[in-house]
Image (cartoon, helix red, strand yellow):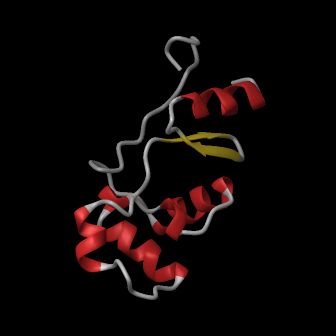
């Protein structure tokens, strides 16, 4: 984004609290399930949640309790969002809507 001279705001959800509403909004914008937003290789996930049948709400609550398991970075532009890995994905969203 810096290389493309794009203005952006960073929310460090590992340092700042993230709300249920924010996660639900991100999931909606990404058009994914809550489970698709989870970093399944994180030890917290593997040790506490892997293999369990969890509802969407339970997965979201796990992310609130353990934000480290949330995929990152997530780039949001208006009503569009994308997981920024690989980094080339970010170009899709800035080209898509011209931020």
Q: Is 29 left, or right, of 16 in this rendering?
A: right
Vertical placement of 69 versus 78: above or below?
Answer: below
- Depth check: give the residue in front, 4 or 52: 52
Vertical placement of 64 versus 90: above or below?
Answer: below
Q: Is 68 left, or right, of 34 in this rendering?
A: left
Vertical placement of 77 versus 61: above or below?
Answer: above
Q: How many marks?
A: 0
Q: Is 11 left, or right, of 35 in this rendering?
A: left
Q: Is 38 left, or right, of 80 in this rendering?
A: left
**Residue at 69% over, 24% down:** 99
Q: Position of residue 17 (x, y in %)?
A: 34, 57
Q: Position of residue 62 (x, y in %)?
A: 36, 74
Q: Position of residue 4 (x, y in %)?
A: 58, 12
**Residue at 74% over, 24% down:** 98
- Quarter-of-image position of residue 93: top right
Q: Position of residue 27 (x, y in %)?
A: 60, 61
Vertical placement of 20 versus 48: above or below?
Answer: above
**Residue at 49% over, 15% down:** 2
**Residue at 63% over, 62% down:** 32
């Amino acid at each position: 984004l810096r290389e493309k001279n794009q203005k952006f705001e960073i929310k460090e959800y590992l340092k700042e609290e993230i709300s249920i509403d924010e996660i639900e909004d991100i999931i909606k914008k990404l058009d994914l399930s809550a489970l698709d937003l989870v970093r399944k290789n994180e030890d917290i996930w593997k040790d506490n949640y892997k293999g369990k049948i969890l509802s969407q709400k339970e997965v979201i609550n796990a992310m609130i309790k353990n934000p480290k398991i949330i995929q990152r970075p997530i780039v949001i532009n208006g009503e569009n969002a994308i997981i920024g890995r690989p980094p080339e994905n970010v170009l899709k969203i800035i080209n898509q809507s011209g931020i």
